Amino acid sequence: MGRIFFEVRNLVKYFGGHAAVNNVSFHVEKGEILGLIGPNGSGKTTLFNLINNRYPVDSGTIHFKNRDITGMQTHRISRLGIGRTFQLVKPIRGLTVLENVMAAAFSKTRCKNNSREKALAVLHFCHLDHLMDLSSERLSLGERKRLEISRALATDPRLLLLDEMTSGLNPVEQEEAIVLIRKIRETGVAIIIVEHIMKVIMTLSDRIHALNFGRTIAEGTPEEVAAHPAVISAYLGGSDVEG
């Protein structure tokens, strides 16, 4: 068997009697962007929570760099190189933009100077360095989203899980987010992106994995998935594509 960068195999997660994730399998190659789509409640964010062990897996396995990380503690998964963002961005209140990113950088170093150096580099990369001394509570939504990405990048991920980083943004901010995500990929970081804005997911993704009711319904190129009858049916039958 060849070297596996990232793969989930036959993942299952129940909440009560409901299978939120039901026998889902997919993989991600180094430097690839995989889009994860599906109607509201299809299991996308639950998958992220399984990957970094915010929820325990009921069955199935998760592999990263040829290592089984199923059930591994969340902080250890982060240290191995899997970073993530959250739908609801919540910077640490009372801290500046720089201090927020430094707090994330401390996951990899105990040295204040090293964490500051890392945070400054990440803020420059994400075009937030001009706001580094501003209280995080004063940021706009678009700026808070970039801060969320900055905090994730400060942990030095090789795989980044992006959860709806363009929702709520205006068209200009969406374009800026697309540029930033492409820039992250150019550094060699692989990305799994959950997004409900189809223009964003179709523009960024190398491949797309589509879910409905916790099950895989299609996988392929953006063009293949967009034309898949099961995907068309899932979206025509739903009110939105969040979840």
Image (cartoon, rainbow, N blue to C red):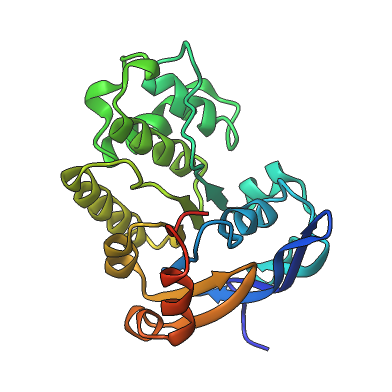
Above-or-below relation of 213 to 111: below
- Nearer to me, 40 or 174: 40
Q: Can residue 33 be seen in this snapshot?
A: no
- For the view shown, which residue lies furthest in the left direction? 172
Q: Position of residue 241 (x, y in %)?
A: 44, 59
**Which quadrant would residue 20 be assigned to in this image?**
bottom right
For the question of whether residue 138 can be seen, the reply is: yes
Quarter of the image for the N terminus: give it.
bottom right
Q: Residue at 40% across / 38% down in the picture?
A: 150
- Quadrant hosting residue 191: bottom left
Residue 115, compared with residue 87, is above or below; it is above
**Residue located 53% across and 32% down the image:** 104
| Residue at image coords 47%, 63% | 238
Residue 71: image location, x then y, percent: 80, 55
Q: Residue furthest top?
A: 94
Instruction: Reply above or below: 33 against 98.
Output: below
Q: x%, y% of residue 221?
A: 38, 82
Q: What residue occupies the far bottom of the structure in this picture?
A: 1
Residue nearest the observer in this picture, 131 or 42: 42
From the top left corner, tell me how far across and down residue 78 is, in percent: 62, 47
Q: Is residue 94 left or right of residue 111?
A: left
Residue at 41% across / 41% down in the picture? Answer: 149
96 displayed left or right of 157: left
**Height in image: 202 above or below 56?**
below
Q: In terms of depth relative to the viewer, which is nearer, 151 or 17?
A: 17
User: How many marks are shown on the rendered structure?
Assistant: 0
Side of 193 relative to 58 (left or right): left
